[in-house]
Every structure is written in C-alpha cells, then in structure tokens.
Amino acid sequence: MDLSFFSWDLISKYVVSGFYFSVQLTFISTLGGILFGTILALLRLSGNPVLAIPATVYVNGMRSIPLVMVILWFFLLVPLLIGRPVGAEYSAIITFIAFEAAYFSEIMRAGIQSIPRGQVYAGQALGMTYGQNMRLVVLPQAFRNMLPVLLTQTIILFQDTSLVYAIGAYDLLKGFVTAGKIYGRPEESYLLAAIVYFIICFGLSVLVRRLQARIAIIR
Amino acid sequence: MAWDWQVFCKNTTEGTTEALCWGKGGDITYLQWMFQAWGWTLSVAVCAWVIAVVVGVLVGMARTLPNSPWLVRLANAWVELFRNIPILVQLFIWYFVVPRLFPGFRHVPGFLLVVFALGFFTSARIAEQVRAGVQALPRGQRYAGMAMGFTTAQTYRYVILPMAFRIILPPLTSESMNLLKNSSVAFAVSIAELTMFAMQAQEETSRGIEVYLAVTGLYALSAFAVNRIFAFIERKVQIPGFIVAGGTGGH
C-alpha cells in the first residue's frame, strides 16, 4: 500500500471530470426520472386499461432486467434509432432517465396512494378538474410524503451510475481506474474510489435521515 | 432490419452453422455458450444468496439484541459500510485488492471472490430487512419468551425469528431478484456469465439485438422463477389467520 501517488494533480486531471459526469448523470436522471415516473404512475392509476397496461408492462419490464443489460441495450439501440453514432455519456443519460423512471414511478404510485381518498373527494367537491386536483391537492402532499424515499433512490442512483463502466463512459469510478492505470497503482485507486463513494453516499444518507425526522414532526 | 436467429447455431470457433444448433467434438455453438453462461449466472447468484442470507440474518439479528450495545454498533457499521459503496467498486476491491492485501486470498478462485462481493453487498440489505422484521413484532412477543424463562438465544430461535422470517419474505423476494440482476456486474471481472456472453457474442457476431433479446429473456425468466419459488414458500409457511397473504408485516 502506497498512497503517496495520490495528489492534487491526479484529482484535477482524472477524477474531477469523472465526478462531474457522475453528478450530472445523477442530477439529470433524477429530474427526468421523477418527471416520467410521475407520468407513468398517473397512467397506471388512471383506471383506463389502454393507458395503464402499457405503463405497467414498461415498469415491470424495466424492473425485471439488470441495469447493466439496459445500459447495453440503449448503447446498441440509440444509434440505430437516431441514425448516427452517439457517445457513451449521451447514451448513459438517456438510459438512466428511462430506467429510473420505472423505479421513481413505483415510489410516486405509493405516494399518490398514500393520500387519503377524502382529499381527492374534497378537491372534487370544490369543483376542481382532474388536473387541478392532482396538481394542487394530491401531488404536493404525495411529494412531501415521498421525499425521503425519493432522495434515498437518488443515492442508489448515484451508486448505480458506476455501472456505465460497461460502455466505457467516463464517470467517477472510471476516473479512479484510469488514474490507477496511469500511475501504476490500480489497487490503491480502487480503495480510494470506495472511500470517496462511501463518504458521499453515507453523508447524503445521514442528511436524508435528518430530513426524514424533520418531516415526520411537521406532519 | 431482418431477424437472424441462426446466429445461435453458429460454431463459436469456426463460424459455421451447426445442425441442431449443437456443436460436435468439443466445439460449441453460441446457443450452448449462452446456456453455460446462464449456468454461471445462476451459480453466482445462488452461492451469493446463501452467504447473503446467513450473514444478513446474523447481522440483522445482532442489530436488535437488547443488551449488547457494541454488537449493535458493529452490526450497524457493517450495514452502512456495505450499503454505501457501489457493488461494482466492492467487486473490484474483492477481486483486485483483497488478494493483494491478504495473502490467504491469493489462491481463492475468481468465482468465489465475486460470490463474496455479491453476498456481502446483499447481506447488508437483508440485515436491514431482518432488523425491520424483528422490530415489527410487538414487544410482548419478546417478553413472552422471557416470561417462559427462555434465554435470548432461545427467544430468537423459538419466538422472534419464526415470525420475523414470515414478515420479511416479501422484501426478501425482491432482494433475491435484485441479487440475481446484480450478478450481471461480474462481467467486469471476466466471469463468463450472461452479461459477459451478451457483450462478447454481440461483438463477435454483430447480431446484438438477437443476442441481447435472448439474454434479457433469460434474466427475466430467472427473476420470474425466483418470484414463483418465494411465492410458493410464502404459501407453504403461512400461518392461517396470523399474517395476511401478500401483506407486509401485521400480526
């Protein structure tokens, strides 16, 4: 074990850009995943089989295959669909939005279902349309109830971004692996990668737990 | 784009199409290779599952022990450690770093190192479920055990665990399916499992869609099988009137 090779030079050259991509990927796919996940959840809860069945098939399909396979699929299919080769990073972003939407939709569905029926009826009694009822009554409460779970899913998502290794995208893990290869210290850089991931994910999960406690008091 | 399922009948070394899609004299077709890869996926998942359940139950139990604060802290630390590092990074550590740091691991086959990585990673998640399951039981159950003069070990063995196991069966089902899916990361250390097969066969044959479809189908089939097995167990061990079928928790 020799950690002396670890320097600011190494961080700025190899790790920072990878870290930046991991954060970017996490951020974009959380937002996109929540957006499309909410739509999927609303489709599934619509009570209309023409809308609900395709959404259910999509969600269950995504959830029954490994993320690595989904990443490979999109890397293969996206260039075919748009007719030109795309970078691994671009493909990764599309993949994660599509994949995480399935998981976020399950969270949203549970959140929406956790709102008592009386709230919906109250909205209807006030003469609200379905859209108004969802936007003004149900979703704001559902989001608050689900906030800790959504954030926990985001932490998992951040960990999962390391799987873009399969298509060679340059993320945080790849940054460490590359640095390890160049400096001839692969073992040490795997350990450093583990420590960095641990600090980030553990720190965030402590924050989520605190938030959870605060939200629990408000309710 | 036309389908070409003939690709699975191709000989992996010579590229010729074999009759009945089965290679002769030591040669194998892509179909055979895929089934072997499926075998590796299932072996990795099953072995890792055994480790995950044994360790997960022990650690999860330790987190609920009444009078051993240090054991509780140690078990909590275990869960945090294995839950907050991505599985791929943990896999690299087991595969590349552990054999370097601990000479005893130098001759451990790669397959086992992957099994350890996946097993311990999943054990943290199962420990969390076991803890939640034990704590979901009413406190009176533990007191009842004490009132009967049971030791702590006996209370767990005869009172708490039998109930907790039934409570955690639904989350354990999805965690077992997760483990099966997570086994796909073994491609990164060149274990010849399904994802590895998919990547290599795609490269060699350029029939990515057919290859990926078949592999995805096998994963979905395996996950479904796990789901059915657990549903069967859940039905078999159900105590009438005690836990509602399909419900989480409750008494």
Image (tube, helix red, strand yellow):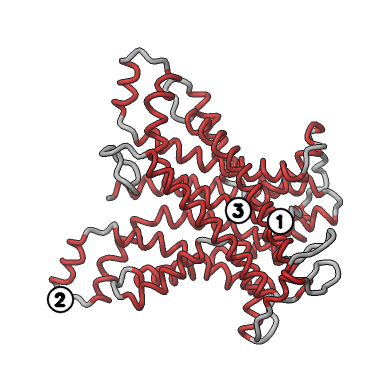
Residue under the image location 40 percent in, 33 percent down: B134
Read off the residue under disc 3: B182
**Residue at 42% from the left image edge and 15% from the top image edge:** B151
Residue A186: give x, y in percent of width and height: 81, 49
Q: How many marks?
A: 3
Which residue is located at x 52 percent, y 25 percent?
B71
Report crowding for label 3: few under 14, some 14 to 19, many 20 or more residues within 10 A (C-alpha): many
Q: Which of A108/B238 is in front?
A: B238
Q: Amino acid at mark 3?
A: Asn
Regarding residue A210, the answer to whether it shows in the image is: no
Residue A9 lies left or right of residue B42; in this view the side is right
Label 3: which secondary element: helix
Instruction: Say what amino acid the circle numbered 1 marks.
Output: Gln
In front: mark 3 or mark 2? 3
Mark 2 burial class by Cα count in 10 Å: few <14, some 14-19, many 20+: few
Q: Secondary structure at mark 1?
A: helix
Q: Position of residue A4 (x, y in %)?
A: 82, 44
Report which residue position mark 1 lands on: B36
The kind of secondary structure element at disc 2 is loop
Nearer the observer, A38 or A79: A79
Q: Is residue A81 above or below residue B90?
A: below
Q: Which residue is mark 2?
A: A127
**Would you identify the image quadrant in which residue B244 lies?**
top left
Tag 3 and tag 2 share a subunit: no
> Do residues under tags 1 and 2 come within 8 Å of each other at their CB atoms?
no
For the residues marked 3 and 2, what is the alpha-carbon distance in whole angstroms? 48 Å
B122 to the left or right of B206? left
Q: CA distance from mark 1 to mark 2?
A: 62 Å
Instruction: Give amino acid for label 2.
Output: Gly
